[in-house]
Amino acid sequence: EVQLVESGGGLVQPGRSLKLSCAASGFTFSDYNMAWVRQAPKKGLEWVATILYDGSRAYYRDSVEGRFTISRDDAKSTLYLQMDSLRFEDTATYYCATRAGTHWGQGVMVTVSS
Amino acid sequence: DIRMTQSPASLSASLGETVNIECLASEDIYSDLTWYQQKPGKSPHLLIYNANILQNGVPSRFSGSGSGTQYSLKINSLQSEDVATYFCQQYNNYPITFGSGTNLEIK
């Protein structure tokens, strides 16, 4: 069974950092482009970042470029999102997903508040 | 950025009815379009990809169509379990963008 399990969320002050992890199982993680997608409370879905299957390239939405870093450790079948200089508007549930959208994690809440 | 204009924002229909949800892209996305269903408190669930290919395990009452800039999701014979929010997503170009969602309820 395919599973994606996010962790690392929580309450953080503006300007601080947080690192999300997503542990994958049930499929060959290293074959898949992976993504982070977020959803602010009661709002729609917003793509955050994608990393290619081989880690050769990453793509970011403009509002997180330079602040967030997506990475992967294929030996651990784990996807990461390093979030620096967090802003109030980064408050959301963050989902890890295969880039094609076939599999999603349950989501992890990140709240940026003073 | 490619803008995805989704309509309607909300929809109320009776059991057994057929409903249509539309997505209009701001430029040609060459059928690089996905439809998702999201139930309250749950993660999105893939329904359709490449505009018209039904994901494994998705009931055949769901179908997708369209090309160029205009796409639609059709749900035949509406069931109670179809109550959800539906999103379109284009993946033709970065940044990947979503429609604003359609909240579907039963009358």
Image (spheres, coloured by chain):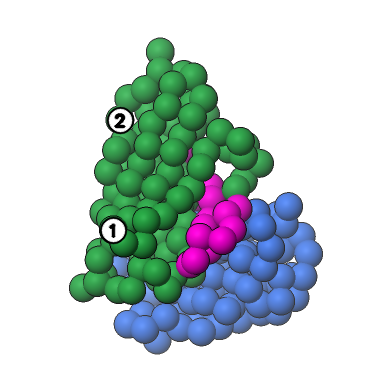
Q: Determine whether the residue tagged by mark 1 lies in a helix, strand or loop.
A: loop
Residue sitting farthest toward the front:
A75
Quadrant of the rendered image containing residue B42:
bottom left
Q: Is A37 situated above or below A10?
A: below
* Residue of label 1: A76
Chain in blue (letter):
B
Determine which residue is flagged by label 2. Answer: A10
Tell me which chain appears green: A
Q: Is residue A52 above or below residue B15?
A: above
Q: Which residues are magenta?
A: A40-59
Question: What residue is shown at x 30% (from left), y 30% (from top)?
Answer: A10
The amino acid sitting under disc 2 is Gly
Chain letter of mark 2 equals A
Q: Is residue B96 magenta?
A: no
Residue B61 located left or right of residue A56: left
From this viewpoint, which residue is outermost toward the left?
A: A1
Amino acid type shown at disc 1 = Lys
Quarter in which the C terminus of chain A is drawn? top left
For marks 1 and 2, give the CA distance: 23 Å
Mark 1 closeness class: few <14, some 14–19, many ≥20 residues within 10 Å:
few
